Amino acid sequence: MKFLMSVAAALALTATASTFAQKSAADGIAEYRKMLEDGNPAELFEAKGEDLWKTARGPRKVTLQQCNLGLGPGVVKGAWVQLPRWFADTGRVQDLESRLLTCMETLQGFNAAEIANTGFDKGEQATLAALSAWISAESKGLQMALPQGHADERRYYELGKRAFFFRGGPMDFSCASCHGEEGKRIRLQDLPNLTKNPGNGIGFAAWPAYRVSSGEMWSLQRRLNDCYRQQRFPYPGYASDVTVALGVYMGVNAKGAESIAPALKR
Amino acid sequence: MQRKHRLITAALAVSGLMVGCATGPSSADLDQQAMAMIKAGFREQGIAKTDRLTQDLGQAACSGPNPPPEAVAEKIQAEALASVKWPEGGQYIGDWREGEKLAQNGRGMTWTDSSAAPGANGAQCYNCHEIDRKEISYGNIGPSLWNYGKNRGVKDVTDPHSAPIIQYTWTKLWNSKTYAACSNMPRFGHAKLLNEKQLSDVMALILDPRSPVNQ
């Protein structure tokens, strides 16, 4: 209840601010985020995610505590700010969600392809959203530091860059149409320039996030999925290589940016 | 002699290895890999079919951080101009009130929209442009269109002196790539995003002297 009242008050404040001066719209939003700092609903998902990590689940009834997110089996703290990265056991560059699918299949016996084809928030996709919230929260305040030591990590950066600039669809949009320059907006929504480090807690360093407008916890994959929807592209496969490569491109560009995930978004 | 030869061979092998490491796949290889990755990465959903990933000349040439060579840009622009269809019966100017509604409407052509027919689409203008100053929620990817017609001396849309700017604007809306090969603006007529009636209403919004945009 207290949370809802704060949201209402903050939204009113945002509306008032933008009536007087458009430039202050972003300030108003920042202010309402500040007001909600003690009550980001993402925390509920974090708690659920931690619980899911430690609970014996799946056909094999085991936990995810032996899952290697890149820093060794079971190491969660600091893992998020180094993903996507290359994994020796799969021989692939994987983002968090791709990696979680691997762990859920190899450790717990789930069918990864089946989960990848499940709609967001349904079935085990809800598990992935909660796990994303908790795992990213365990890196809160750390700087983005994606490794580029392996040849495939560097190759994925180059492929992600090409995907970022790829124009298509009925409106000729690419990621760069909106996110290739400084100081741009769609309506009043600020658009970070993702071809470089857009700053602490902005762009790549702000996702996963809880979205107040839809009341949903969005993982990075879901964020990219909705970008492509608005780009008028066909549907990107969940944890597909192209989405992982985009993550490498944006994450490496954001090197040094402080992660605030899971953030709070409008 | 034998030993020296072996050393040289070893040195050459090492340097060859290092060159291999430093260069990695060529830029052309990466282009090809990226294309395959993109084609494999998407599936159709509702009205959003995978043919949306098939690029035409302009989309392909404008898919990098740098603009295409001048000759390519000129070809794109010439093809764009040739694609422009003039309105039936010379009906360039419709109803600015309908134009404002279309300008406000940002819907259409996503996989959650049920129809790809132009009638189902908005014109999305405010997403990127300031138009009527009363609307403060506007984007800035494109230039301001406030007083668009007034600033260009349009006092009467039927006056022959207005014809060049009217035809320029129709062309820009029909195929934005006519004047800038890599324009960020969609090709509203060419890509069948809006029909002629809708385009004429948007035209009226920014060109009609009676439109609030030109006060």
Image (cartoon, grey):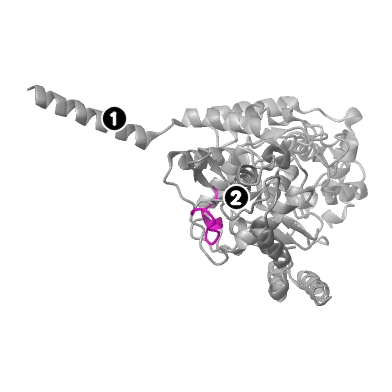
What residue is shown with label 2? A96
Disc number for residue B16 = 1
Q: Quadrant of residue A258?
A: bottom right
Q: Which residues are magenta?
A: A71-84
The relative height of residue B39 versus residue A70 in the rendered view (above or below) is above
Q: Is residue A251 magenta?
A: no
**Could you tell me the amino acid type at mark 2?**
Leu
Rendered residue at 58%/47% (across/down): A95
Nearest the eye: A190 or A251: A251
Spot occupied by residue A208 in the image (x, y as percentages of width and height): 66, 57
Viewed as shown, does residue B62 lie left or right of B8? right
Q: Chain of mark 2?
A: A
The relative height of residue A172 versus residue B4 in the rendered view (above or below) is below
Nearest the eye: A266 or B13: B13
Label 1 SS: helix
Spot occupied by residue A177 in the image (x, y as percentages of width and height): 65, 45
